[in-house]
Image: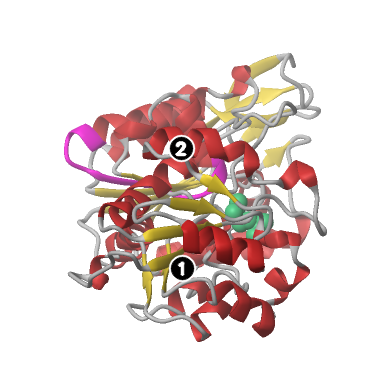
Amino acid sequence: VGTLGDKDLGGKKVLLRADLNVPLDDGQRIADDNRIRASVPTIKFLMGKGAKVVLASHLGRPKGVTPKYSLKPLVPRLSELLGVDVVMANDCIGEEVENLAAALPDGGVLLLENVRFYKEEEKNDPEFAKKLASVADLYVNDAFGTAHRAHASTEGVTKYLRPAVAGFLMQKELDYLVGAVADPKKPFAAIVGGSKVSTKIGVIESLLAKVDILILGGGMIYTFYKAQGHAVGKSLVEDDKLELANSLIEKAKSKGVSLLLPTDIVVANNFAADAESKTVPASAIPDGWMGLDIGPDSIRKFSETLDTTKTVIWNGPMGVFEFEKFAAGTDAIAKKLADITAQGVTTIIGGGDSVAAVEKAGLASKMSHISTGGGASLELLEGKTLPGVLALDDA
Ligand code: 3PG
């Protein structure tokens, strides 16, 4: 939106693609409104310029028109945050949409119905993209969370609607996840966790070329331990990734990256919130036990290391933080990152689960940047380009 500069937006119809894909509970109430709040600055900017804002998003993964994936439940919260009565359309294309858009006052907001009610959206169908485009004079994409999808509303539409520019949220996400990662204040550390190494190979390999320190945690570490010949009990292991784990360790060495694995582990006798638990050395997980969190010695060592950094990126929890008993490692990292942010360290939280952990700990506002994109931030950290970004004038 910044690149629109002083363009006269008064009275112009702007198709704004946002990622309003928020979780709804059984009563169709918004369970987490982060993505809505993150979309507000761009909408308000356009409203303030007197534009007519036509807001498009997907919600969930519906197969055809499915009432439970309607965007209607978002109208009250959006209206409240924007200070206007947001008008809701029953469709995302067609005559009703055109009439409602034409009737919008300057600074008004029209929310289109779920673009994924049409299979053409995900197919990136040109005719559908053209219909979406036809309602507006220009296009703004602020849907970072969906920018890794080449869909009609994120990519195809730009072939029929120009200018096509990034919104403030898109810009901020890219500034941190691309800018800060490409040109970090050093030392630069990455913390990578999560349950499976197979889903994080690309991220680890890509980050190994950039970071000074790599800290690993979460379920993936047992594959590393087993690869190193340690006893892992009945911990989660991807047996077809043992060689890969060793090659990542070698790669870290050859690049001079200091690789930290947990030194102690909280093990459980089964995978349950109320499982019996104890702390053991990481190199000796007993038979019949599984690792579900990092232990206090690991937390201390990781924390000391994080104190020496200037930029940190975190993707993936340290343990099964959904179970209170195994949340200490993840909580401690969140707390540490909040502390060092206050001391001027740039902290970037990318990826769905670590974001959820930071939010659960109530520390979201204490970080430099919390990404609104799970899959999108993962792909960026893997060094991929995002089709929704590439399609923009200011790419
Ligand atoms: C997300 O929640 O990651 C985005 O909104 C994209 O949704 P999708 O994975 O269904 O494309």
Q: Quadrant of residue 58?
A: bottom right
Q: Amino acid at mark 2?
A: Ser
Picture quadrant of ligand 1: bottom right
Taking depth in this image into account, of 207 and 390 the one nearest to the observer is: 390
Q: Which residue is mark 1?
A: 206
Q: Residue at x 56, y 41 (%)?
A: 353
Q: Quadrant of residue 72?
A: top right
Q: Please tell me whether residue 257 belongs to the stretch shown in magenta.
A: no
Q: Amino acid at mark 1?
A: Ser
For disc 2, the neighbor class at 10 Å (few under 14, some 14 to 19, many from 20) is some
Horizontal and vertical percent position of residue 388: 50, 72
Write the start and end of the magenta stretch as one range.
Answer: 341-353
- Identify the disc placed on residue 338: none
Q: Which residue is mark 2?
A: 79
Please state, as top left, top right, bottom left or bottom right, where the C terminus lies in the image.
bottom left
Q: Is residue 245 above or below residue 133?
A: above
- Left or right: residue 175 compared with residue 61: left
Horizontal and vertical percent position of residue 81: 40, 35
Let me know if residue 86 appears in the view: yes
- Left or right: residue 55 compared with residue 338: right
As helix, strand or loop, the secondary structure at mark 1 comes to helix
Horizontal and vertical percent position of residue 88: 58, 48
Please state, as top left, top right, bottom left or bottom right, where the N terminus lies in the image.
bottom left
Q: Is residue 343 above or below residue 257?
A: above
Q: Residue at x 45, y 50 (%)?
A: 350
